[in-house]
Amino acid sequence: MCQGSWVSLRTKLEGAARRARFPGSERYWERRYAAGGNSGAGSYGETASWKAGVVNGWVRDLGVRSIIDWGCGDGNQLSLADYPKYLGIDRSPTAIKRCIEQFADQAQMSFMTFRPGELHDPAGWFKADLALSMEVIFHLTEDEVYQDYMSRLFGSAERYVVICSNDEVGTEKVPTERHRRFSDWIATHARGWSLKERVDPPSNLDLMSQMYLYEARDQVNPS
């Protein structure tokens, strides 16, 4: 076997070993928060400020009255938000407890823990003007979790969906990430939505994600 083939095989075996040790996205993030960890560098510093500025501007300019956030994390990104009415949802009970403590004096903010398969909402109680996903999608490593998440994200939005993520298939170097073209999912499963705006990060930020604003088509072409 040539050297290149050995390197390729070793890379594949190392990747398989990392995935085998990975406990799954839900357990990983709960363990991380329970051990005192945070939501990651993207929720802090200049990166968090840039993301907050984009979303706050959209909320203001579009007259958004309510937001449902699928993956609120430890609340640091939320501390920069200017939202009128907000529901933060996360799979980590520890993260939700942190948010409840941090925003206890914010009457317009509610929080809840969520696990896929344990929420059935045909009556549409979980609805908001805007559904938000801030660098969550590429952390959903399991196919069934990803499919459930995307369905709930778009199913809970009445007017807009905001996604902060990269939109391409990549070679993951860590088992906590799996990069997908989420726009392909939208084109197939959320045909009533169209991309209204995309904002790329400034060059001084080391950020692989972009900001995407989707709009319900019945607003664009009302009957």
Image: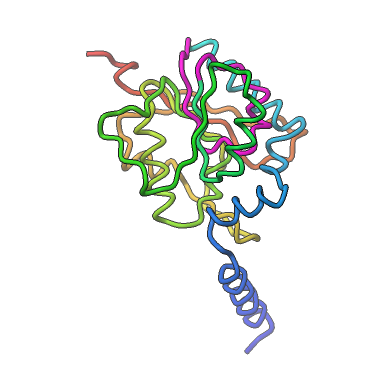
Magenta span: chief secondary structure? loop
Asked if the stretch drawn in magenta spans residue 76, the answer is yes
The number of callouts visible is: 0
Name, please, the residue furthest toward the bottom.
1
Report the residue at 64% width, 36% height from top: 98
Residue 167, position in %: x, y? Answer: 52, 43
Closest to the observer, 154 or 195: 154
Residue 160, position in %: x, y? Answer: 42, 23
Asked if the stretch drawn in magenta spans residue 165, the answer is no
Report the residue at 70% width, 52% height from top: 35
Read off the magenta span: 63-85
Point out the image quarter for the N terminus.
bottom right
Closest to the observer, 94 or 122: 94
Left or right: 129 with respect to 169?
left
Report the residue at 33% width, 36% height from top: 190
Closest to the observer, 98 or 202: 98
Left or right: 93 with respect to 189?
right
Task: Say how the picture is coloured.
Answer: rainbow
Left or right: 9 with respect to 86?
right
Residue 70, position in %: x, y? Answer: 49, 36
Among the 4 quarters of the image, the one containing residue 195 = top left
Give the answer, above or below, for where 157 lies relative to 6: above
Point out the image quarter for the C terminus.
top left
